[in-house]
Image: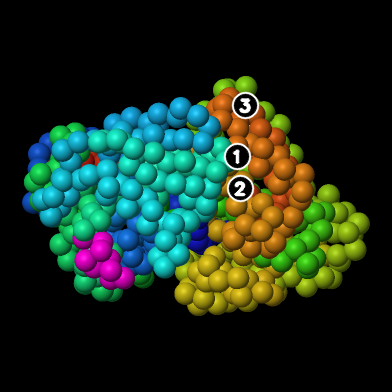
Amino acid sequence: MKRLLSRAIAGAGVAAVAVAALTGCGQSAVGAHAGSYELTAHTPKAKSDIDSFTWALATEPFSLDPAYAFDYADNTVLSNMCESLLRWNSDLSVSPGLATKVDHPDPLSWVYTIREGVKFHDGSTMLPSDVVFSLEHHLDPEVGSFWFDTYKNVESIRQTGADQVTVRTRIPDPSFNKMMSAAPGVVFSEKAAKAAGRDYGNASTGVDCTGPFTFKEWRSGESITMQRFADYWDPEYRAKAEQVRFVILNDPNARVNALRTGEIDGSWQVPTNAIDLMRASDTGKMYFGTNTTVQSLIVGDMQGPLGDVRVRKALALALDRKALIKAAVQGYGKPTDALTTKSVWTDATPETITRAFDQLPKLDYDLAEAKRLVKEAGATGKKITYVTAPIDSSFDVISQAVASAGKEIGLDIEIETRTPNAYTLLFSDPNAVKGVDLFTTQWYLSSTDPLEMYAVIRTGEFSNYGHWSDPAYDALTNRALVTDDPGERSKLSAQVQQLATQQLPWIPLFEIPTGLWLGKRITGVDPSISYMYAPWAAKIGRAD
């Protein structure tokens, strides 16, 4: 789940100018196909191994310790060195990883059979005791794991056989097992972690795991290098590259230029305002794949004007999502009325998915109704503080368009610009949200469980930034969370999604695909959000 940033909102007035300008630019780059895209499951298979390739990171990882791998850069790197008990595949299915199977003998127990003969990068053999240590790492208060929420219902983690680890929960918690294909399920060497202590996962120590690449070097602020692990256990994911170097390029223009010139071979994070330019380039190719991400507005203060659901709905109706997608992400998105994508509803029947999405309250552009709701709520002229940051070009579009939409319906939306670092604190420091009515996020899910999204906006949850509270919503969500039967759980989740769209504690805007740029030298990786937790770089080799 998480995390930062946003794309934008196009209101009346601002939208018309922005869309016209951007459409013209797009036409010159890729003609009539500007903003259009199709999802691709696979890129062409690599023809042979490659000595090395380079990959751009938009930000530097906070840490490679799985307890703190909670955002894009961290997991982009970590997923190639470390592996989880289960593997998240590119089609978002889950298959055996470091656990060969999972048994669920009763609602409170998850029994993992641990794969035998797997080697850590230091040559030692992975044992069930390493699994116990790795999972318990998230429960250690001295560690302060960012993934603690995954473990909050865990009662015990024990080795219960020669190749077996059992996790017991206090209440039924099907979500726990779902997260074992993400960073919370990563297994690492107990010996190495204890030797490094508080330095584990930082630039001086790296990590000692079981993945197809080993940690080689981390030059702070510059690059991270990993190299092929010769003794890797899975032939299907044996690394085709001898070495991979991640280059940290915070400046989006520098990143785009490095990709276009071939200085950097690939990236998952191509600035949206440069996608048309990249598609017109002859130095590589853009791909679009499966994602679990929804662009949303977060209401940061339920004590202010947006505490009235009528005002929240009015703002949602004042936003023309089609114009917004063109202005903010150059057309590379799809409007949505939900905070989840259909891709995470893998346990639901087609009928349940229809109920979950097609029967939602519609948030289609309706300026007249939006004005009526603001007037009815007595919010005309009320001040709303919208916080933004100069993170990429879309942020300026976001802030100006939100302000324009608010003005159209009688709200006084004041833009406050913070530094990028200060903006990210909105997601981790409760004090940073004080006095903030509205901000935006690009929130992805780390599992195929829609409740991963909806659980975080219950009363008292850390990521419920605006302190929204609805007892009926909490009761329904809590009931869904402890429901073991996948079909029944999905039906309850559909009802939860219905309530969330009715109440709008977060305002959904649009879905975006996973973007991937591959230079002409390389190919083989599947375009999918699964890259966050599966060893995607192992598949990359020579394209010629």
- Residue 538 percent across, percent down from the top left: 20, 44
- Residue 388 percent across, percent down from the top left: 58, 70
Asked whether 203 or 294 is in front, the reply is 203
How far separated are the C-alphas under marks 1 and 2? 8 Å
Mark 3 or mark 1: name the one nearer the start of the chain.
1
> Quick check: 541 left or right of 293?
left
Counting other residues with Cα less than 10 Å from the Cα at mark 3, is it few (<14), some (14-19), or many (20 or more)? Answer: some
Question: Can you see residue 258?
Answer: no
Q: Residue at x 66, y 33 (%)?
A: 492
Which residue is identified by label 3?
488
State how the image is colored. rainbow
Q: Residue at x 60, y 39 (%)?
A: 481
Three-letter amino acid code at the position of disc 3:
Glu
Image quarter of residue 535: top left
Mark 1 or mark 2: name the one nearer the start of the chain.
2
For the residues labelled 1 and 2, say whether their Cβ atoms are less than 8 Å apart. yes
Which residue is identified by label 1?
481
Q: Which mark is residue 455?
A: 2
Tell me the element at label 1: helix
Q: Which residues are magenta?
A: 192-200
